[in-house]
Image (tube, rainbow, N blue to C red):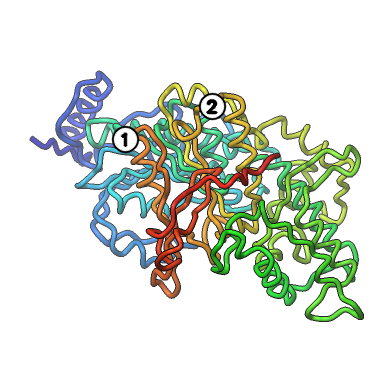
Amino acid sequence: MTLICKPVSGIALSSGLVLLLMFTAGVPLAAAASCESVAAMTLTKATITSSQNVPAGAFTLPTGSQSSQTQFDHLPAFCRVTATLKPSADSDIRIEVWMPVSGWNGKLQAVGNGGWSGAISYQALATALAGGYAGASTDTGHRGNVASFALGHPEQVVDMSYRAVHEMTVQAKAIIRAYYGNPPKISFWNGCSTGGRQGITEAAKYPADFNGIVVGAPAIHWINLNAARMMLNAYANRNPEAVIPPTKYPMIHELVLKACDALDGVKDGVVENPARCHFNPEVLACTGSDGPTCLSPAQVETARAIYSPVKNPRTGEIVMPALLQPGSELGWGTITGPEPISYSQDTFKYLVFKDPAWDWRRFNPATDIDLAIRGDDGVLNFTDANLKPFFQHGGKLLMYHGWSDQDITPISSIAYFQDVTRKLGSSVAGKSIELYLVPGMNHCGGGPGTDTFDKMDAIEEWVSKGTAPDHIVASHRTAGKVDRTRPLCPYGKVATYSGKGSTDDAANFTCKARGWIHRL
């Protein structure tokens, strides 16, 4: 029997409250509540602001959303719940929980953010819903993809760093239980970039929140990352002669491919393993005056710095590993453009110096890096490799990172993976944590590599079978059509061609250890 409670009369509301008391008492229910009745439930330090059924294909994106409406025109009917969470007196965290009216697979998929967050991830929510999941997303406690919210609001920085995601997860599970009569049997996290950092932080701080966590290109070591971006940008623009114009990027990229593309035995326009690519920018040095097909002496030094670790000029300590790897040349402008990437500027303007008038030209690495790290006190820079409680809980952490990432170095993912396996033993690799590097993929997607693969299918298989996939089939598309597939291999192995059949078919490759593991 289906119990329908609509809060339009005193009797209906009372029925809804009785239903909620049954939830609280832990009585298993075979029937769901109405979507509208969920609005009557009481949450701790949180308020449901709306709860309504959305008919199939009827969802309209809020004004100002950056997503395309097309994706939402084919969604199934769902119950949309919005809520505001206030775990601190200064918190203002907004969340949305989307629950399929029919066909729920019994699972939660919480989705991550990008940059400074500041918005509900509607596109990721839609993807989760279309896959049969109940989805949850948060704006992490502020509006807009800038860090100005941090001025005078330290609690909101904590919310953005980690608390908002945890609070969202707790409340989403309660809302799902209220609607369906049962909590999700399995809970997943799926995020890239900031969403990747959020996933790693969840695993370390709140090990019971999720059974499986998918982490792409995680923006971990946030303070160090943005300090290193500032330093590399300053060096790349130290004088007009040192600047490498974007018109030269393709020329450099072609020379890198010529030197390293075929090292894996297949010439396909992709550097399979940049760790084995020892490209020396000196080969591009102009023999005469500067020109479009060569690099001036100052530009050679800039290119060399791009491929090198970023070091503190005062202590010599590595602030971050090389931010850009061989094969990433077409995207160099992201970090080495005319001025630092906005996330770096915002970090120092609003979090370090707390001065909206601060100008990036005043950045002094000899003093400002240490100041930034001390001031953060491990909030945004939090990166704990002790995932033992998460693994003991049965949690699985699937990491992936594009080798051609133009925004966040893949070496940071390798370093974190190695930190975890060193701390907890190599046996956790493949059982509880695994890293898949994606040759030729840019930041979270794009690029000439096979950048499209089903992350949720991979983590679902892992959680159900207990062992990480020995490979993940990925594809590359041109004009929407698949023109290449390849296996993505666990860290320490590479896709190796059998020597027969098309090199654009994953079936003709196997994952083999090639002795190339990147030592840090």
Please state the horizontal and vertical placement of residue 217, each as a whole percent of the image. 57, 48
Mark carried by residue 387: 2
Q: Which residue matches tag 1? A: 464
Can you say which quadrant of the picture contains the N terminus?
A: top left
Label 1 or label 2, whichever comes before in sequence order: 2
Mark 1: which secondary structure?
A: helix
Camera-side residue of 416 and 373: 416
The answer to whether the residues at label 1 and label 2 have Cβ atoms under 8 Å apart is: no
The image quarter containing residue 30 is top left
- What is the spatial separation of the Cα atoms under label 1 and label 2, in whole angstroms? 20 Å
In which quadrant of the rendered view does residue 171 lie?
A: top left
| Residue 183, x across and y down, in percent | 29, 31
Residue 109 x/y as whole percent: 37, 42
Residue 51 horizontal side relative to residue 297, left or right: left
Question: Where is residue 223 shown, x and y percent of the image?
Answer: 72, 41
Q: Residue at x 45, y 73 (%)?
A: 478
